[in-house]
Image: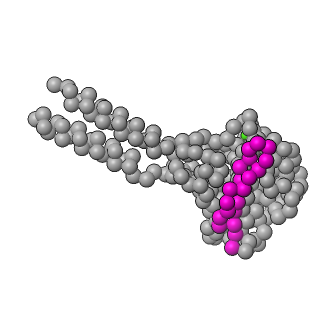
Amino acid sequence: MRLLLRRHNLTAVLLVMAMFAVPRAFGATFVDTVGDNFDGNAHMDITQVDVSDDGTNITFKISVNAASITSPDWGKYTVGIDTNGATGDFGSPVGNPWGRNISMAGGMDAWIGSWVDSGGGFQPWTYAGGSWTQNGSGVPVISGNMTTITTSLASLGLTAGQSFKFDVYTTGGGGGDSANDAVANPSQTVNDWQVPYTTPASGNGAALSYTTVPEPASLGLVAVAALAMAGVARRRP
Ligand SMILES: [Ca+2]
Ligand SMILES: [Ca+2]
Ligand SMILES: [Ca+2]
């Protein structure tokens, strides 16, 4: 009987450890209003953004209202990230490394700029010490009405188990262009190309929140806790 109990406990512990050994991924979907952009271009009208991560890389899948995000293909798809309300680029009207009239009230700490023309590309940037640094580059997966950007958490200055605020914008090809659409804002952002847009800290249009998966060390602690619990159970008569 005692041996049987031990076997059950061991099985439970192994099951718990297996659960946390399996690669994990978190994800969340953020839906936006259809037709809320002033310019009327369907490929500039965000309908949904899916964010997911596996503790190492993070993915932003941006969907627009056009059947094809590359027809026409001049739209720019960007992400603003605010990790700390006291840090980041507080420039106005330009609070990002691409010279767009886009900013975040909490100060932008990271930025992804992307395009879908000529095969597409993206750049992850971080802001520190008063200037922006580009951390490599990549190519998004462009398919139908979506462009999917996957970059390392590190390239955005993010870590596992971190909560941050963000917004996703469509913008044009010129410096001074604004956010034609923002996923965090269900209403119209601006009424002309270069009218500056700021993602507010609260109220309508306030930055969205996302938390990356816990770091593996935290998951290891869960397994240790499970072992400890099994040990307690085994000592019961
Ligand atoms: Ca929209
Ligand atoms: Ca900030
Ligand atoms: Ca919107």
- The relative height of residue 173 versus residue 199 in the rendered view (above or below) is below
Q: Is residue 33 visible?
A: no
Task: Tell me what residue is drawn at x 77 percent, y 65 percent.
Answer: 75
Quadrant location of residue 1?
Answer: top left
Query: Where residue 215 sits: x, y (%)?
Result: 49, 43
Q: Where are the magenta residues, as a range?
A: 119-139
Check residue 135 for magenta coloring.
Answer: yes
Q: Is residue 11 left or right of residue 157?
A: left
Q: Nearer the viewer, residue 201 or 187?
A: 201
Task: Tell me what residue is drawn at x 20 percent, y 40 percent.
Answer: 8
Query: Where residue 110 sits: x, y (%)?
Result: 71, 48
Query: Where residue 143 sits: x, y (%)?
Result: 62, 70
Q: Is residue 85 left or right of residue 55?
A: right
Q: Is residue 228 left or right of residue 100?
A: left
The residue most toward the front is 129
Q: Nearer the viewer, residue 50 or 14?
A: 14
Task: Tell me what residue is drawn at x 24 percent, y 44 percent.
Answer: 11
Task: Tell me what residue is drawn at x 33 percent, y 43 percent.
Answer: 16
Task: For ligand 2, give the image quadrant.
Answer: top right
- The relative height of residue 1 versus residue 52 in the rendered view (above or below) is above
